[in-house]
Image (cartoon, helix red, strand yellow):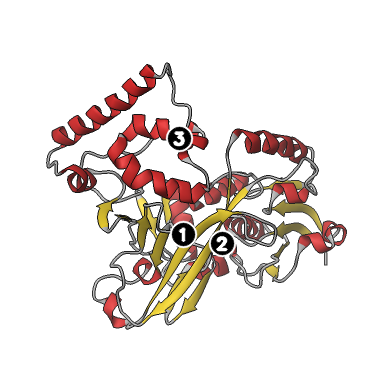
């Protein structure tokens, strides 16, 4: 059978593209080298709990069009992301808000918090001027100017260095262009109009998007790419862009995440879905307790078990799953060369985090595909 589109990768970009193409009467074939569909949003049911196998995914957007679209596939719940940071056994609310400032300094009014922030920011600016510097040269200097030393050292430095595998003084300043600071008691991390998790897990979203679309798993495009090129008029490619071009310009760098999963004989381990561990001495970046994404209030206690995942961030190597790009100057310049090659590829659409070498949240992925189809 000949297809209009061969879609390489069944993650959110590929699945949404296939769904919209099928609605327009196009014939699509979706292939994925993994044993299951869904890319990184795939969930595995363990002890009646939907475990986010490739890391926590929380859908959030200000776009009613995007929210209505995903809810037309599966209804989403009311989950609100309110992570907690653990630094040497002390807990701090995120994002930085009046709860954080009270926990950090004991201040109780916005004016007191603002005064403390201004005082610490001024110290950072004064130090830079004393060193003859006008603009932050790295992430550490940028963070100190934005938020001050106390919050930087307790809640940013260790976590960021674990996340990137590099000292904050070696990371570019643009990684932290701004830090959200709220002078209100509000722990809603994303602060978007719409936020939630598909009721029943992300597999229901992917299954709904791919309903009626031919799919094949355990199928690697690169094993016989000449064969796969011939099965369709156009290709939608969502894998690594450097791999598509046989690494002709060199290897792009990625970060990856290793998960250490554990089933516990308790109904409630940490009381929250996401707890970040921000001190450098703790090897993992955070612990996810998956049941809190979909079970609320008394429902948490109805299941006597829970599943947690400790996340370890590390440098990507062949054989690992690439998770997010390393957006320093070297990799940005290398990607630009690959992008120039991609622009010359006829009948190939490059889309998604790996194909565009760009960190994407889920909603912008859906929004981008909707724009392609002008839906």
Q: Position of residue 282 (x, y in %)?
A: 40, 58
Q: Is residue 292 above or below residue 181?
A: below
Above or below: residue 225 compared with residue 302? above
Are dots 2 and 1 in contact, CB under 8 Å? Answer: yes
User: Residue drawn at (69%, 47%), measured in percent from left and top?
Assistant: 350
Q: Secondary structure at mark 2?
A: helix
Query: Local crowd at mark 2 within 10 Å, few (<14), some, or many (≥20)?
Result: some
Q: Quadrant of residue 222?
A: bottom right
Q: Which residue is mark 2?
A: 40
Query: Given this view, does label 3 or label 1 mark the residue nearer the observer?
Result: 3
Determine crowd level at label 1: few under 14, some 14-19, many 20+ residues with C-alpha closer than 10 A: some
Mark 3 vs 1: CB contact within 8 A: no
Residue 57 image label: 1
- Helix, strand or loop under label 1: loop
What residue is rendered at 87% in x and 58% in y? 226
SS under mark 3: helix
Residue 64 image point, x, y percent = 41, 49
């Amino acid at each position: 059978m000949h297809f209009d589109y061969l879609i390489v990768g069944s993650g959110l970009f590929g699945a949404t593209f296939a769904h919209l193409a099928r609605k327009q009467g196009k014939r699509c074939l979706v292939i994925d080298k993994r044993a299951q569909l869904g890319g990184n949003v795939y969930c595995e049911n363990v002890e009646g709990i939907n475990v986010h196998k490739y890391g926590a995914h929380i859908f959030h957007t200000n776009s009613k069009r995007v929210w209505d679209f995903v809810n037309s596939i599966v209804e989403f719940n009311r989950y609100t992301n309110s992570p907690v940071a653990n630094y040497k056994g002390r807990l701090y609310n995120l994002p930085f808000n009046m709860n954080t400032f009270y926990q950090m300094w004991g201040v109780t009014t916005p004016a007191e918090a603002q005064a403390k922030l201004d005082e610490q920011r001024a110290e950072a600016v004064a130090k830079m001027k004393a060193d003859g510097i006008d603009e932050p040269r790295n992430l550490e200097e940028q963070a100190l100017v934005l938020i001050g030393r106390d919050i930087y050292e307790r809640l940013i430095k260790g976590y960021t260095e674990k996340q990137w595998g590099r000292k904050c003084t070696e990371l570019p300043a643009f990684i932290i262009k701004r830090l959200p600071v709220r002078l209100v008691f509000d722990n809603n991390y994303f602060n978007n109009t719409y936020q939630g998790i598909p009721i029943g897990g992300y597999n229901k979203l992917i299954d709904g998007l791919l309903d009626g679309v031919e799919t094949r798993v355990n199928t690697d495009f690169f094993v016989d790419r000449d064969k796969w090129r011939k099965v369709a008029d156009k290709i939608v490619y969502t894998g690594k862009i450097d791999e598509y071009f046989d690494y002709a310009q060199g290897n792009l760098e990625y970060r990856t995440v290793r998960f250490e999963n554990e089933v516990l004989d308790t109904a409630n381990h940490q009381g929250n879905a996401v707890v970040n561990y921000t001190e450098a001495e703790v090897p993992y970046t955070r612990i996810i307790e998956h049941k809190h994404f979909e079970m609320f209030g008394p429902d948490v206690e109805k299941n006597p078990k829970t599943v947690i995942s400790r996340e370890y961030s590390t440098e990507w190597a062949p054989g690992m799953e690439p998770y997010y790009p390393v957006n320093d100057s070297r990799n940005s310049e290398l990607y630009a060369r690959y992008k120039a090659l991609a622009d010359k590829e006829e009948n190939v659409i490059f889309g998604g985090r790996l194909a565009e070498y760009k960190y994407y949240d889920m909603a912008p992925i859906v929004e981008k595909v909707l724009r392609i189809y002008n839906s």
